Amino acid sequence: MIVFIGGMQRSGSTFCFNIAREMLSRNGPVYSEPTYDVVQAQSNAGNAHHILLKAHRDSDHLRRLILAGAARAICSIRSPEDAIASWIDTFGFELEGAVQEFELWFGMYRAIQRSCLTIDYEIIEQRPAAAAGMICRYLGFGEGMAEQLARKYSKASVMAMVQDIRRGSPGIRDIGFSCYDEVTFFHRGHIASLDRRNAAQTLSRDDLHRIRNALGGCRP
């Protein structure tokens, strides 16, 4: 099975990735890679039974597979203002660059929306077991592991987990602006706080206006 995790940035896509990874691994070896290049991933996968990709954009070939039902896609989605505020706060990117990246993501999402499972960030955050159950059903598995996996990848669990991520440590990939675990794809600053913050707390009125002008028609 080919599964593409293509959620919006900072919307719970890594949660979705790990739920899918855990479920697929119970039914054979899984090859996972942070890429949308499905052709190269298939070449790299060797004898793996499943290929699990994670990226915030796709390729023409991957899109054709998704639209034809030959690959499954899972997209998490969130209020653009809150997602961009979180992305800037986490990685320190500039607003204009963030807006452009999100415009590209929405272009992809609109193209595959009818062929993918969409999960709202509110469900992932407030009812993670329900979100895990949605993923399990979509991939054709029972929901018996949903609650256990939701606890394993809860915000509190992940926050504790990422404290041990260090540049130069085994199994940690350094990508310059961040570093991440090569198995779970969680990065060092993945969850900075368990307190929920919205865009109005971190962005100026001008920044919010810029986002709404650019992405106002792109709502979850």
Image: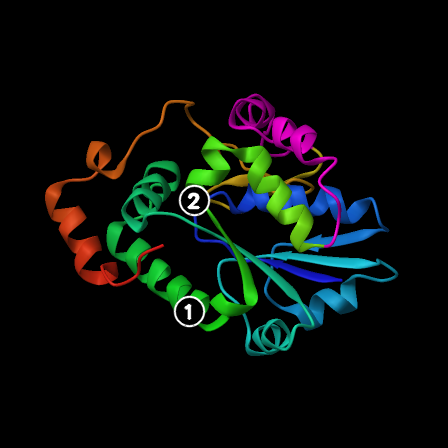
Q: Residue furthest left?
A: 206
Camera-side residue: 172 or 218? 218
Residue 174, numbered circle = none
Q: Pointer 1: residues within 10 angstroms few (<14), some, or many (20+)? A: few
* x and y, in percent, of residue 110 in the image: 42, 69
Count up the numbered dots.
2
Q: Callout 2 environment at 10 Å: few (<14), some (14 to 19), or many (20+)?
A: many
**Identity, as a three-letter code, of the amino acid under mark 1:** Arg
Q: Position of residue 129 (x, y in %)?
A: 59, 34
Q: Could one spot residue 189 in this view of the protein?
A: no
Labelled disc at residue 10: 2
Which span is picked out in magenta? 140-169
Please tell me the numbered disc located at residue 110. 1
In this view, 201 is above or below 68: above
Q: CA distance from mark 1 to mark 2?
A: 18 Å
* Image coordinates for residue 83, horizontal then vertical, percent: 35, 45
User: Which mark lies nearer to you, 1 or 2?
Assistant: 1
Comparing 192 with 76, the one in front is 76
Check disc 1 and report its element: helix, strand or loop. helix
Q: Position of residue 28 (x, y in %)?
A: 86, 51
Residue at image point 58% right, 45% down: 16
